[in-house]
Image (cartoon, coloured by chain):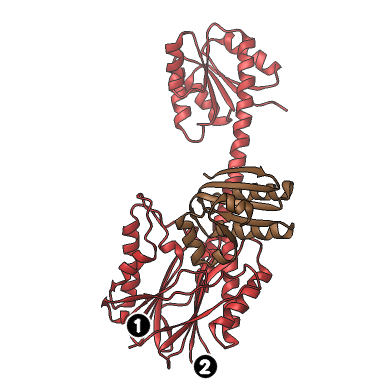
Chain colours: A brown, B red
Amino acid sequence: MLNIQTRQEGAASVVSIQGKVNFEVTAQLRDVIRETVATVQPKLLVINLEGVSFIDSSGLGLLVAARNSVDKSGGKLHLSCLPAPVKKTFDQTNLTNYFSIFATEQDALRGA
Amino acid sequence: MAKGSVLVVDDEAPIRDILSFYLKRAGYQVLTAANGMEALEEMGRSRPDLIISDLRMPEMTGDELCKRVKSEPSTRDIYFIILSAMDGTASRIGGLSLGADDMIPKPFHAQEVLAKVDSSFRLIEMQKEIKRQNRELTSFQQKVQEEMALAAALQMGLLPKLPGETRGAKYTHRYLPAAGIGGDIYAIIPLADGSTAMMIADVSGHGVTAALISAMVKTSFENQARLGGEPLGWAQGMNQDLCRSTLAEQFATAWLGRLDPTSEKLRYVVAGHCAPLRIVGGARGGLQRSEVLRGKGFMLGLDPQLPFRENEAEFLPGDRLVLYTDGLVEVEREDRTMLEEAGLRRICAELPGDIEAAADAVIAQTRSHNQPAPFLDDVTLVILDRDS
């Protein structure tokens, strides 16, 4: 079971995820992201991965799709707080270079 | 049309008559019997939907009748109501423990019995509907399972035939899809110039969708490799193919390599996939040094503009190449750790020379490391030994 929280920070939407992101829970996360993008159309979507212990290929696919859909609606996607195991998966798949990744949520919100 | 049929069993004729009268007036078809024996005879002629039976009767008592009806598979589903003069909780429980579905204490009002029969028929109808839906679901599930089995067999057919041989090398695989059908695929094909093209890929997600894409990945790879050239060009071509034909969240990690039997080098591209191991002199077995064939590159199917990079590694006669998908090393154990690349390297450091025994050993040792956690993702292991 994935714990997902969303909140608004000015023009930015923040989605915080806790748990294991694998194919069993991607549907749940997909709905939240889709709804946030569709209803708020945020200039900036920050996904905080601090509480994520593991992410599999379907989870990565979801994040890639999220980036593409935010791009299309003229916004930006920033990821923040990648724990070491998640960082490793991103490195292995070279996604570190595909996403804008920030050390803290504050940095991600500032886009610094 | 009658609402349904009720068999009234009682040794007292007036009770049978009263119940028959009310039930018939309410539209039920009514059968009667004076004791358990007669009831069984009656049931041999026509099968009632519901039985209302007295307990104390000559020849065969109501509890014996109930036991027989409920222990026989063909009559087990007949709704059974016991009429009993013994009131009180103890006897109610006694009657229900015989397998009766309900009880009516004597003396009773005919209206009370009628109300109970009506509500029982609502239950009976509901049960019938559930059974019908259950049959439909079961047959649907069976159909799906048959189709999945067929698809799984077809997918197995997409894998290279074993024992595998290509110019200057032999190979084997272990393929364990998580859901009978999976998103892992690999291919080893000899090229016109005498070299061998190799590919292992893991499509995101599971099941039928991933399996369909894996077939696409294989076709795309074969088309690209047959055009000639190097893995870099293949990766770029495959990426274009996949970006054109897959949906938003679907992509594949892959490793592509080209083995030239006249060269001591292996050229390869890592597209977001687990880096394979080169076991130096591994084809001879025993304790050997391993190397990770690292590289950086995006997964296939993300974006047609993304760049890939080609790498080169030494690969000498007698060397062994271990290709795998992440399902092999990413099983979370009870202590929350995973085998990972480092653990696989430890296992691969000492393997039998025989290629089949080596593949078995890798799977067995991985499994015993994960114990009792099973493989959850698709698992593919390919071992290729370069001839000495």
* Residue B256 visible within the image: yes
Q: Quadrant of residue B163?
A: bottom left
Residue A30 placement (x, y as % from top left):
63, 51
Q: Residue furthest left?
A: B286
Residue B68 placement (x, y as % from top left):
45, 27
Q: Is residue B376 above or below residue B283?
A: above
Secondary structure category for the residue under label 1: loop
Question: Which residue is more in the foreground, B279 or A70?
Answer: A70
Residue found at x 49% / y 69%: B273
Residue B159 placement (x, y as % from top left):
49, 74
Residue found at x 58% / y 55%: A79
Which three-letter amino acid code belongs to the residue tagged 1? Asp
Q: Which is more N-terminal, label 2 or label 1?
A: 2
Secondary structure category for the residue under label 2: loop
Which three-letter amino acid code belongs to the residue tagged 2? Asp
| Nearer to us: label 1 or label 2 | 1
Residue B281 placement (x, y as % from top left):
31, 82
Residue found at x 59% / y 76%: B219
Q: Quadrant of the N terminus of chain B?
A: top right
Question: Which residue is more in the foreground, A44 or B139?
Answer: A44
Tell which subunit mark 2 falls on.
Answer: B
Q: What residue did someone put label 2 on? A: B193
The numbered dot on residue B319 is 1
Q: Is residue B62 above or below residue B211?
A: above
Q: Quadrant of the C terminus of chain B?
A: bottom left
Q: Are marks 1 and 2 on the same chain?
A: yes
Q: Is residue B89 above or below residue B339?
A: above
* Residue B147 visible within the image: no
